[in-house]
Image (spheres, rainbow, N blue to C red):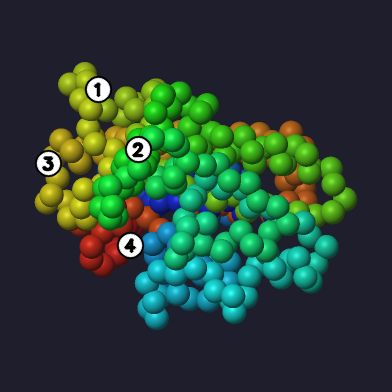
Amino acid sequence: MNVVFLLCDTLTRDKLSPYHQGKGTYAHIRTPNLDRLAERSTTFTNHWVNSAPCMPARRDLCSGRIEFPWRSWGPRESFDPDWARTLREETHVSTCLITDHANLFDVGSGNYHHWFDEWQFTRGHYNDHSADGPAPEPGRAGQSADIYRKATSGMDTEDITFVARNFTTAVNYLDNRANDSRPFFLYIDEFDPHWPLDPPEPYRSMYLKDDVQKAAAGSAFCKGTDSADYTVEELEWLQAQFAGKLTMVDHQIGRILDCMDRHNLWDDTLFILTTDHGEFLGEFGQVSKGGGPSYPLF
């Protein structure tokens, strides 16, 4: 039995068509490949994260330990159980991590790649120092935006986005391993549709209401967790850009599903799609991961 474990950061239940079913505030968001996956899968309707945000949730997943509430953020510890280590030491399964999520390697939150037989990293997303240019100013404030802008200069088509390149690596892995006699565990950690919210066309304009919005150049970055810090127009912009980025991620997921079809991998492969946490875009007065309690959406 093979396993493909796909974690897409920041998926939110009421924005995914297998859940919203064409109803509610975000009924207009299209995720046809998630629908396609749901048709042949079990869709969980009562899924709760133990720890959030990004890295605490991942520590829960790979170790079985619950990070919250005893600490807020940290690496996979040397004393943790680890799924890749267990597979390496106790089974004949080959393991691979494919990701564009820089925090898996970052100081203070990393060590997630150590026990995989192989790992491949698409560089440059969010706060990953991968591009040449002036060094950021000292201190942490504002660094992520400067680092990200350097890495994404000229990134204006879908095929060169982080998600497209990351999924190309995953498709290549599956193409090469589909007929192996040795089973595999493939962990794809996809950072999108996480902030910054800046999908290329046609996704940038896909969910904007009119030409005035389409001509605007709203911010791609979160400026606070309180929705009162944003104008109505800013929230509408962010909602449309998140929706566009989500549809782009869905399109790329379709490439993985096509690969699964092409090699008849459904017969002997467990395919799991999950997330680390949801996302506020003005709901309950909160933005991004919020600054208050979490809420069940429906």
Amino acid identity at mark 3: Thr
- What residue is drawn where x is 13% and y is 40%? 232
| Residue 212, x across and y down, in percent | 17, 21
Mark 1 or 4, closer to the camera: 1
Question: In this image, 127 relative to 93: left or right?
Answer: left
Amino acid identity at mark 1: Lys
First in sequence: mark 2 or mark 4? 2
Q: Which mark is residue 296?
A: 4
Q: Which residue is mark 3?
A: 231
Query: What separation in Å lies between label 1 and label 4 (alpha carbons)?
Result: 32 Å
Query: What separation in Å lies between label 2 and label 4 (alpha carbons)?
Result: 44 Å
First in sequence: mark 1 or mark 2? 2
Q: Which mark is residue 214?
A: 1
| Residue 176, x across and y down, in percent | 78, 39
Q: Which mark is residue 134?
A: 2
First in sequence: mark 4 or mark 3? 3
Of the 4 image quadrants, the one containing the C terminus is: bottom left
How many residues crowd around disc 2 within 10 Å: few (fewer than 14), some, or many (20 or more)?
Answer: few
State the SS at label 1: helix
Query: What separation in Å lies between label 2 and label 3 (alpha carbons)?
Result: 32 Å
- What residue is drawn where x is 11% and y is 51%? 228
First in sequence: mark 2 or mark 3? 2
Where 121 falls versus 202 (above or below)? below
Residue 293 is drawn in which quadrant? Answer: bottom left
Mark 2 or 4, closer to the camera: 2
